[in-house]
Image: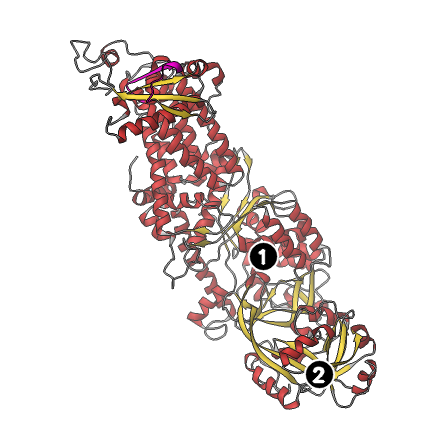
Amino acid sequence: MQANLAKREPSFLAKWQGEDLYARVMSATAGATPYYFVDGPPYANGDIHIGHAVNKVLKDIVVKSARLNGHHAPFVPGWDCHGLPIELQVEKKFGKVGEKLDAAAFRAECRQYALEQIDRQRVDFQRLGILADWHKPYLTMQPAYEAEQLRVLARIADNGHVVRGFKPVHWCLDCGSSLAEAEVEYQDKQSAAIDVGFEAADPVALARLFNVEVEGPIRLVIWTTTPWTLPANQAIAVNADLDYALVRFANAGLLVLAAELVDDAARRYGDSASVLGTVKGLELRRHAIHARHPLKPATVPVISGEHVTLEAGTGLVHTAPAHGVDDYLVGKQNHLPVSSPLTSSGKFSDEEPVVGGLHVRKVDEPILAALRETGALVRHAVITHSYPHCWRHKTPLIFRATPQWFVSMEAAGLRAAALEAIDATRWIPAWGRERIRGMIADRPDWCISRQRTWGVPLALFVHKVTQEKHPRTGDLLRVVADKVQAEGLEAWFGSQVYDWLPHSEADDYDKCTDTLDVWFDSGSAHQCSFVSTNPGVLDEHGLAPLADMYLEGSDQHRGWFHSSLLTCVAMRQRSPYKAVLTHGFTVDEQGRKMSKSLGNVVAPQQVTKTLGADVLRLWVSASDYSGEIAISDNLLKRMADAYRRIRNTARYLLGNLDGFDPATDAVAPGEMLLIDRWAVSQAAQLQAEIRQAYADAQFHLVYQKLHNYCVTDLGGLYLDVLKDRLYTTAAKSLARRSAQTALLHIAEAMVRWITPVLSFTADEIWQLLPGDRSASVFAQRWYELPKLNLAEDGVDWPLLVATRVAVKKTLEDLRAAGTIGSGLNAEVSIYADTDLASALGAPGEELRFWFITSGARLAPLSAKPTDASEHELSSGEKIWVHANASQNARCERCWHQVADVGASAAYPGLCGRCVSNVHGAGEARRVI
């Protein structure tokens, strides 16, 4: 095995590509039980970063380990291709639609841009050693995929989940479109927080309700952090069960607010307050109290709603159904209009008082000035609070009611069915279940319509009068899908209503101009990816198999896991996946996010150039992905050291298998030396643990167990003890062939253990192992190690291991004192009681090889010298060890210092066993 991993890996890649390795592996495993893995598609924009590398390597580990378990496990990579980010890139070059390009040409440029980005990302993913169907990925912009997405929508519509609504949605003024929940992120924002008094339309009647008589105006006070929504106010909401007080403030006058918040309001206003009377919120609603709108000549009613609380404000809530979910719901219950003077451009209509013609981001000051002028502004402050922002533009969003299409969570029982599907899924880590469950339980209807150019059309026909979808929507969607599959998206975008509907209907319907939410695109991959790349696995109804696993970052509980769940449950009444694995985000050693300004960004391209992809892959496997994943140059260097330890162990195994032919040289398990049987048994035990770690997706345990094995159990013990036998016994002797047989068993097992993680290294080892290696290592199953019954051997190996630790400590003391150099300069005596001495005596004269000393003897406890060192073994038993420098001459071949060195006149520099090994019948070994 050669070094220079980073330089040599590309030659492996070239070889894999030249021999079409993925196709070979698929062919070799074709008859096995399938394992279906659906790749969550990265967005086709920009180079991959370290998070992409973590994600794709984890997926590769999952799929490769599935093949070891005997599965036929395809890995079809995917890309998410539609949506605003690509539109923005094309706009930089060509301007908005209509400036230099018409819509069709604009979409063609978007498609071309996406293909260029995919090619760039594909190269980087392949460099990581990801074995996948790179020649035939699924792309959400493939006609077959787009068409099947429309068929998915057809099934969902047929099942009664698609509804139209004039509802408030997150709206990005920069995108000019509604956003999905997963496209919203929360950041701190400074906002004007104002208390506004709505003057009672009939102050006498209101005072009478409080059983008092007063003179002057009475104001019902609301508190809001969105002054721009006041022009759309339609009501004031109270909680029917709360007490409300009529309060005389020294400066603010007569105000109505929640009784429990009077003292808090007085402190905020810097004013003294006197409560004149109280009533329940229910009475304010029952007596049809109205108040004058503070910005326009209109009155608004007092209504009640359960969303009104005492957590903040005044206990009276400004209600604008066009600009908030709670407002919309309570407005619907009270038959309030869902209207707003705010247009889709972000400007208020010209005829609107105070704010007419102004942009929403510039109306706070005019509104505050108007409120001051009428005396309606009770208090103004500036607060910092968490506020929804566009994840692309990082700008504040607004809630805006627009006619949109929704997947309803309640109309056909989608919410309840989705919650059941969650409970039927395995979540890794387990907390993922509660996280997505809470999101599904509380989420509003899913707005699936977008006002974009580059996307899959929301191919609906809408009645001009009723605004309802066509009664044959499902059938029409399937017709459109067939046309799109044959001719592409322009088959829809370039068509007229008359191309789809008979003339008797066409005049009554409009063709929807919206596109589907991109989360609907990727969220349909559970069906569309199979149809577009592997239709042979569809059932008789054209439906895809259930995926064995989905794997993405922890943000995808509200993203891809979420949209996939809803589309599949709405379509098929079941989850799209059997298991979901979630990994954390990458941070530096200090736990900070990757940032160019901090200079802590680690690019996977740079790591593969300097250290090699296998080192990066080993770091991924070694990280506990359930939390944040730390990376830095320092951590990678440490991982490179760990990699070298594993690699050097493999080199040792291969080096000592040189010239070994398993067909003629392998030793039967029953004839192997006892230590070799024990080593193979240890490997079998470790393999069971590693297999379980892979099955549990605990890849960091795979790394820990493998690294510890190479350092301690194998490198630090068995291989250390084995050197003498490998280097001194006759080449074809049973002693050496037994050792080589054990090494081959261990190497055969180990190469499979590392294949999912260290793929380049595993392939190199595989090709260098003796025997037929024409089949790929990536098509192998777990190696079947010999089943051995060590109880028949009569050796207490745990006792010997514990005693070896004690002897090594004694030898270290001698070495530190300068008495000896290596263990072969020493002779040891072990003093133990009769039973313990009997157990330790199993190796007989070969005990010295276990301790790697020139002499080792057992003696009764009564004979121990006063300077013997006491050691307590892990079993609780005690032994005493005494060591001294050997006075014998050293054999120039094996370096043992024994009495018979020079006994042969013909070979004066050799010990007796070396003379026999070189010129005679060879020594006989039984145990070690």
From the viewer's perspective, is residue 790 above or below residue 622? Answer: above
Q: Badge 1, how many Cα within 10 Å: few under 14, some, many 20+?
A: some
Mark 2 nearby-residue class (10 Å; few <14, some 14–19, many ≥20)? many
The amino acid pointed to by label 2 is Phe
In the picture, residue 338 is in which quadrant? bottom right
Nearer-the-camera pick, 56 or 491: 56
Could you tell whether 199 is left or right of 865 in the image?
right
Question: CB atoms at circles 2 and 1 under 8 Å apart?
Answer: no
Q: Nearer the viewer, residue 880 or 583?
A: 880
Q: For this rendering, which residue is in front, 344 or 454? A: 344
* Amino acid on which disc 1 is placed: Arg
Whether 881 is among the magenta residues is: no
Question: What are the residue bounds of the magenta stretch?
Answer: 852-867
Would residue 794 appear left or right of 202 to someone viewing this image? left
Q: Can you give x and y, in whole percent of width and height, for residue 85 in the image?
A: 48, 64
Q: Residue at x 53, y 37 (%)?
A: 695
Closer-to-camera residue (400/777): 400
| Left or right: 463, with 560 as reference point | right
Marks 2, 1: nearer the viewer? 2
Q: Report the Cα–Cα distance between label 2 and label 1.
A: 39 Å
Looking at the rendered structure, which numbered label has been put on residue 611?
A: none
Mark 2 and mark 1 lie on one chain; the one further toward the N terminus is 2
Q: Is residue 632 left or right of residue 480?
A: left
Residue 64 visible in rendering:
yes
**Does the magenta-highlighted stretch encompass residue 861?**
yes
The x and y percentages for residue 421 are 66, 48
User: Which secondary structure, mark 1?
Assistant: loop
* Residue pointed to by mark 1: 558
**Residue picked out by circle 2:** 198
